[in-house]
Image: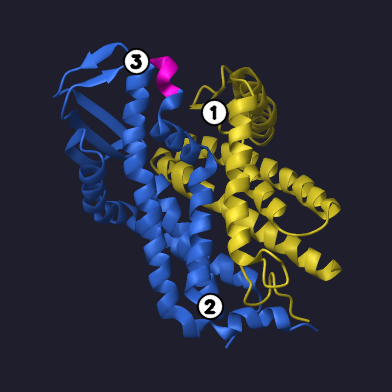
Amino acid sequence: MKCSGLQSPCVAILGSFLCVAAFFWLTGPFYGQLLLPLFRWELAAFFPDYREIHLDLGGQGTEIYFTLRSVLAAPCRVGLTLLPSGTVLTGSTLLGHALQHPVIILTMAATVWLCHRESAGRLVVCSLLFLLAVELLDVPLVLIGSIEALLFERFAPAEMSRSLLVYWMHFLNEGGRLALSLTGGMLAILLGIERRPCFDSADRIQG
Amino acid sequence: MIRNSFSECGILLPGGPRQRYGRLGFALLFFTGFAALQAGYSYFLTDTVKVALVQLSTLDPSAGLINLFTPREQVLVKKQMLLSPYASMSVQKGCEGTEGLFLLFAAVAAFRTSWRQKILGWVAGLGLIALLNISRIVSLYYVLRFEKKAFGLLHGYLWPSCIVLAGALFFLWWTEQQEGTA
């Protein structure tokens, strides 16, 4: 069954977007809370130099942020300055950024699902896996990137361009986040339904 | 006639077997194309040029529109800010809408069609994203003025997603035209 009940894929996209966006608008802080244990695990596993003492969601004025408070586990040299272990460092990023990924990836998946209801299970699993991967590539790395950006700006501005995490943070903040979501969504669809005969059949159905 | 890029299974993922590099190729070309555009923009344009772009493409038209529809707001543009007696909003470099523009440019570039069609897609996409971005800034100003609580989610979450949605719909419409003319 193809797009049953829907005359146009545009309606499917708009409908999916409105439902998913409204859902995450209402449940955004809860979704953010769900991600926190994963982010804590990633920070502990991949960034042992920064010992996390506090990672949580908090409001500042009109925005809700992920805020990371960490301490240096060992002395760290930034430019000519040696920062002692125990130095407290803080970084933050918007919750809204983390919400862009599910909105885009799940809208894409829901739209395709409306046209391929028979492949829902595999599509859902692939979409959730890519969503998770994209989230792990975003918030924790941006938090550490923002801390490194502050350190470099303060102690060694000339070395700022050497930090991959700072570069990744700027890349994501300047549109890379959306590109990452869209690419993740496309890959999820590819793996989710690419091998089903109906997916390729469209190329053969011509006038 | 059912066309692969838009109406049927190829939805949201053009580049079927008829296109030599296929769907995975489209996804990878799209991402690398976007990264290249963004890196070029960051590397080759100075901050002065970027600030001037924000001023010309975003701040001035937005202030003009707000004053046109609500003259009592008396919005002024000063030091990359929209200032009025009631609210002030900072519009920094990065707010000029290049994100959405580069996403659309990369998608059009990754789609296999003639250069003429690509240029038409880029020009139309530029107009669309510019209009959307001005609407975004104007709406954010009014939200900051009248409903501050909603500003965070609208700024960080809803508007970026809406621009992607509009860009995706435009891209699907554009690919439909390519299939129609093929």
Residue beneath disc 1:
B91
Would residue B40 appear left or right of A191 to someone viewing this image? Answer: right
Where's the N terminus of chain A, which quadrant? Answer: bottom right
- Above or below: residue A93 compared with residue A109: above
Find residue A112 and report its horizontal and vertical position in percent: 54, 73
Q: Are marks 3 and 1 in contact (CB under 8 Å)?
A: no
Tell me the kind of residue under disc 1. Val
* Callouts 2 and 1 in the same chain: no
- Above or below: residue B35 compared with residue B107: above
In the image, A185 versus B95, the foreground residue is A185
- Between the residue at mark 3 and the residue at mark 2, the CA separation in whole angstroms equals 51 Å
Where's the C terminus of chain A, which quadrant? Answer: bottom right
Q: Which chain is yellow?
A: B
Tell me the kind of residue under disc 3. Arg
Q: Chain of mark 3?
A: A
Residue beneath disc 3:
A154
Find residue A29 and report its horizontal and vertical position in percent: 30, 51
Foreground: disc 3 or disc 1? 3
- Find residue A87 and report its image quarter: top left
Find residue A55 and report its horizontal and vertical position in percent: 21, 41
Q: Are marks 2 and 1 in contact (CB under 8 Å)?
A: no
* Callouts 3 and 1 in the same chain: no
Residue A6 visible from this viewpoint:
no
Label 3 CA crowd tier, 10 Å (few <14, some 14–19, many 20+): few
Tell me the kind of residue under disc 2. Leu
Residue beneath disc 2:
A114
Q: How many marks?
A: 3
The range drawn in magenta is A154-160
In the image, B20 versus A95, the foreground residue is B20
**Quick one: label 3 or label 2, which is nearer the N terminus?**
2
